[in-house]
Image (cartoon, grey):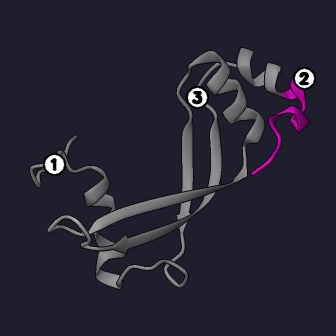
Amino acid sequence: MGDPTDLDADVAARYSHASGRPTAVAFGLLDIEGPWFRRERHWGLFHFLLDGHQKTAAAAADNAPIRLLTFVSAGESLASDDELLRLPETIHADGLGKAVR
């Protein structure tokens, strides 16, 4: 976690006025735990921003979309290999087990 006031305001302003959708880069961990109070297990995908802090600040200030490229660690995640392989389809699921396009 960083202090937002430490960001370069000029760089954030350039991203704020740039065309297109910027991309930030993150390191990800998939944590699958439970069940505690429910029958299903809880999936948590945690992102640690590595690059793109000014891009993210500009997008937040402008209420604009941003892309997030996340590299999910297979070795450090608290998920099985099968669960990690199912992550893309789980992210795109509509809650009914069908992929959303």
Residue that carries the numbered disc 2 in the rendered image: 10
Q: Position of residue 1 (x, y in %)?
A: 74, 51
Labelled pair 1, 2 in contact (Cβ < 8 Å): no
Magenta region includes residue 9: yes
The residue drawn where x is 81% and y is 21% is 14
Residue that carries the numbered disc 3 in the rendered image: 21
The residue drawn where x is 71% and y is 25% is 58
Q: Nearer the viewer, mark 3 or mark 2?
A: 2
Q: Earlier in the sequence, mark 3 or mark 1?
A: 3
Secondary structure of the residue carrying tag 2 is helix
Quadrant location, the C terminus:
top left
The residue drawn where x is 49% and y is 80% is 74
Q: Residues within 10 Å of mark 3 (few under 14, many from 20)?
A: few
Q: Is residue 46 above or below residue 74?
A: above
Q: Which residues are magenta?
A: 1-11
Residue that carries the numbered disc 1 in the rendered image: 95
Query: Which quadrant of the figure has residue 8?
Result: top right
